[in-house]
Amino acid sequence: MSKIEGTCWVADDYVMAYDIIIQEYWTSAIDPEDNSLWVMAGVKDAFNKENGFKDNGYTFIVAAHNFAGGGKSIEHVVAGLIGAGIQAVFADSFARLQFRNAINYGLPFITSKGIAEHCKTGDTLSYEPDSGIITNMTNGTEFSSVPPAPFVAEVSAAGGLMNYVREKINKGEAIG
Amino acid sequence: MTYQIYEQTVNHPDQINKLTMGMTITEKIMAHNSGRDQVKPGELVWVDVESVMTMDYLGKTCFEKFRSLGPSEVFDKDKVICVSDHLVPPPNQKFATMLNEWREVVRQHDITHFYDLGRQGIAHQIMVEQGHVLPGKISIGTDSHANTYGAVGAVGNAVGVTDAAVAMATGKAWFRVPEAVKFHITGVWQPWVMAKDLSLHIMGMMHWNGHLIYKTLEFTGPAIDSLDMAGRMTLCNMTVDLGAKNGIIKPDQTTKTYLEGVAKGEWEMIESDADAQYEEVYEIDINDLAPTVALPDKLDDTVTVDQLVGTKFNKAFVGTCTNGRLEDIEVIARILKDKQVHRDVNMILVPASQTVYLEALQAGHLETLIKAGVAIDTPSCAACAGIHTGVAGDGDIVLSAGNRNMKGRMGSKNAQIYLSSPAVVAASALKGVISDPRNL
């Protein structure tokens, strides 16, 4: 994968799946474009309007512990982030339900300890998927990250688990 | 410690020369259901699933995704379980239409087990009480409290619709084998202290989505052996709120007795090896465990009930996949028998399934509760999902036996939600302020 560059939004603590997709949209269709219109609406007032988050044009989200926690397994969360143009999320840790969804959608959720302490909203970051190096180009700091397992990289390269499995089925290949 | 999926696991030097290592119950189940002799934490495995559950508001999407993978028939019509629970009975036209679309898609796929309105219940209750989750097997569901299935010694796991669609097509799901943490529970259950109190106690101790993220949590010890299936379900149910992958209790005679006549397949009595590896082991003595309450907004902000005695509230709610079972209803009926819910409190009970509803009716509990001034509604997720049946409005202070209390969970963001056991809810409803059931 080639290098990705863009600005970041630094999340506060306890940004939950509930805040990313608020309750009134849980029963809507899972669609990146639709879900992105109101993504992050529960985080703060500035995002609680149509395209309130998306219009900022962020490429990355930087967070601390347990990003997208609170227990929802709905895929609207990851779909909404993708629809809003997010290409990777860096955090100390992720809630496992959304971590799993992110893997299945091919959106890199990348573990990088302490990164939130060294980034401010609006900083320009670059991410090299092959080396796992994240660089804050605004302040010159650099971070390492844990490379994804081969399976995760394969799913990502296929464009998500659906494509990965569909291909296997089409070719008559066994899964697992 | 990193939590990302590792490329390779690294064995402790002491273990490298051992041909086989002891495995935890979860590791064994993952090994047995992926055709391996041994698995280790960090490994990625594709496992066979015993059952796949999906429900009304996500189910149509789930089937659409399944169809987009190619096959027109699910891997096993007896093992894809469909439940109407979040939207029933429909409170508005939008949900009524969604339910109709859902019913149509379930019929198209000729699904054997469809628990629709009239035969409904909260999906996790249905999965266990109808024997769709079995000891030694793995079941997944498109709702986060699928962790409940660990109560019968199964690996129960919440997934999104993508994983469910893949499992519908292939009968398989991918898993990273989780590291294990054990909670060894000793002591004797004291009067009016329930499994929910232990759940909330552990929540306060370990923190909501704290460092138990991705782990398997195993509950062992004499206090677990003596716990009924309802309590085991409560305990495993809330492990998702600790951030864990699953919670599990080894199957025993209680499990066998519960499953007799309802199990929908063969099962395997699996338990952890004596030399299984745990990252940590916590010992909890419940002799001193007090009824515990989570304060509004954060699940891990817990206190013992004595610190809240006298706190005002106006809505009492008992139900949900956490505490809507017959045993829970029995407890509130005992407390409210021949008494009246306080005039300043509106109390609602929503049994977790039609089976529970009927059993509570036959036992006389519903009559007791109706006479006490409790409103009873048809089984569903009800106000716990903030969708219908007693949602919270601005200014409401709710005392709930449910599982989540973040702002807006039960409706208005301007409502407060305290979480507790059914015993605390009933004792408090009686007094009109938060009360300790031990002092009645």
Image (cartoon, rainbow, N blue to C red):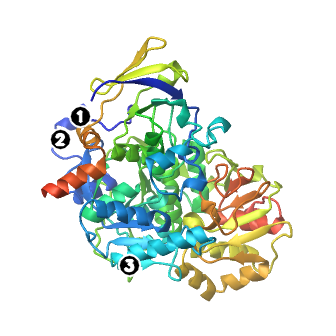
Q: How many marks?
A: 3
Q: Chain of mark 3?
A: B
Name the residue type under label 3.
Answer: Arg
Name the residue type under label 2.
Answer: Lys
Q: Quadrant of the C terminus of chain B?
A: bottom right
Marks 2 & 1, CB-CB < 8 Å contact? yes
Image quadrant where residue A156 sits: top left
User: Residue A159: horizontal and vertical position, in percent?
Assistant: 29, 43
Which residue is nearer to you in this view: B300 or B168? B168
Residue drawn at 46 percent across, 67 percent down: B55
The residue under label 2 is B18
Q: Which mark is residue B433?
A: none
Which residue is nearer to you in this view: B219 or B105? B105
Residue drawn at 23 percent across, 34 percent down: B14
Q: Chain of mark 2?
A: B
Say left or right for B269 vs B217: left
Marks 1 & 3, CB-CB < 8 Å contact? no
The residue under label 1 is B14
What whole-number distance in Å separates the C-alpha atoms at marks 1 and 3? 55 Å
User: Residue B346: horizontal and vertical position, in percent?
Assistant: 78, 69
The residue under label 3 is B107
Q: Are marks 2 and 1 on the same chain?
A: yes
Judging from the image, what secondary structure is the residue with disc 1 in?
helix
Residue drawn at 35 percent across, 77 percent down: B108
User: Residue B192: horizontal and vertical position, in percent?
Assistant: 67, 65
User: Residue B62: horizontal and vertical position, in percent?
Assistant: 39, 62
